Image: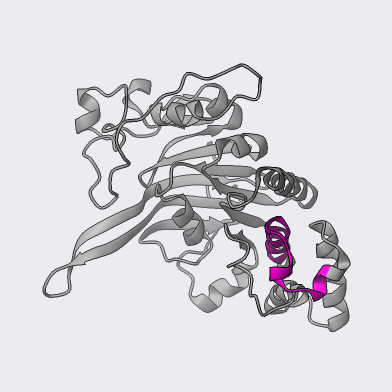
Amino acid sequence: MGLDKFTALLSVADLKKHYDVNFSLFGRPTRQVKAVDGITFNLLRGETLSIVGESGCGKSTVGKTIAGLMSPTEGEVFLNGERIDTMSASQFRHRRKRIQVVFQDPFSSLDPRMRVREILAEPMRNFGVAKRKGDVDKRVARILDTVQLPKDAAGRFPHEFSGGQRQRIGIGRALAAEPEVIICDEAVSALDVSVKAQVVNLLQELKERLGLSLLFISHDLAIVDHITDRVAVMYLGKIVELGPRDGIFGNPRHPYTQALLSAVPMPEVGVKRERIILKGDVPSPANPPSGCAFHTRCPLVFDRCRKEAPVLRTVAEGHTAACHLTG
């Protein structure tokens, strides 16, 4: 995109997260799982960037690492030009309010012993957004109205709400810290279809009204198509395609992206896409294939794919893909 860490709100450079899984007799690691293996992207102010891919591709690990819930193995994370991945816990605590997370399961992510008022008030106190009881109560009431919940919800416990309402509480908790970036980690995947649409519309409205930036992690491309500005497609810990929504959905350039999109139902009655069926399973990140990681399942594979790993190349303005067919 031609932007650097000083012009993007959030900038991620060559981010890696590896796990040691096998150890020698002397305790030295002999095998690693490369959950995230060198990804780079920027998130602009007021933008929604979606990270998509099959389960196990590393997209949730990206979100948790950016949010400081995990430490990266390598790479850099900048927020407003300030590097945050090397900060100590006490230093990062003051920046944490600027990056908040909405998790997948709204029930397990909310403390069942706390009433909604305390769930929303806790981040306000932790980050100094409000301290006096009167200020807290006003802000809690305003947040409940913002996420479209009744005022009497403040005195109830999470188990008294439906799944969609609990996710609204989770969104409200993220908003309570007054963040600049919200990471939505499969935030609607556990919801019913109709409720899912309502929550996605709420997120879109909040982004526009509050000027938020969203990092939207999902495997549901139909939802992504509705909410996103740009899309990053991940496969086995790497970004294989990155571009604007219209470019990804209108003219996907990587065979993996094409296969993912072929499974998305068309909204027009009687119109169907030609389905691309991928053979085999996703390889283990502990033992990735040589060359292009996708070559074991790619319908367009040729000899070069098995030997040489492709790099992201520009295929259109703001649109890159890692495939030898684009070079």
Which secondary structure is most common in the magenta stretch?
A: helix
Q: Kindly indicate the quadrant of the structure image that contains residue 226.
A: top right
The quadrant of the image that shows the C terminus is: top left
x 58%, y 60%: residue? 105
x 70%, y 62%: residue? 166
In the displayed image of the protein, which residue is found farthest to the top?
270
Compared to 211, does 29 lie above or below? below
Q: Identify the image's colour scheme: rainbow, by chain, secondary structure or one colour.
A: one colour
x 51%, y 56%: residue? 63
Compared to 166, does 234 lie above or below? above
Residue 11 in magenta?
Answer: no
Tell which of 208 and 315 is nearer to you.
Answer: 208
Residue 174: give x, y in percent of width and height: 68, 63
Residue 163 in magenta?
Answer: yes
Tell which of 93 and 19 is nearer to you.
Answer: 19
Compared to 114, does 218 lie above or below? above
Q: Is residue 287 left or right of residue 47?
A: left
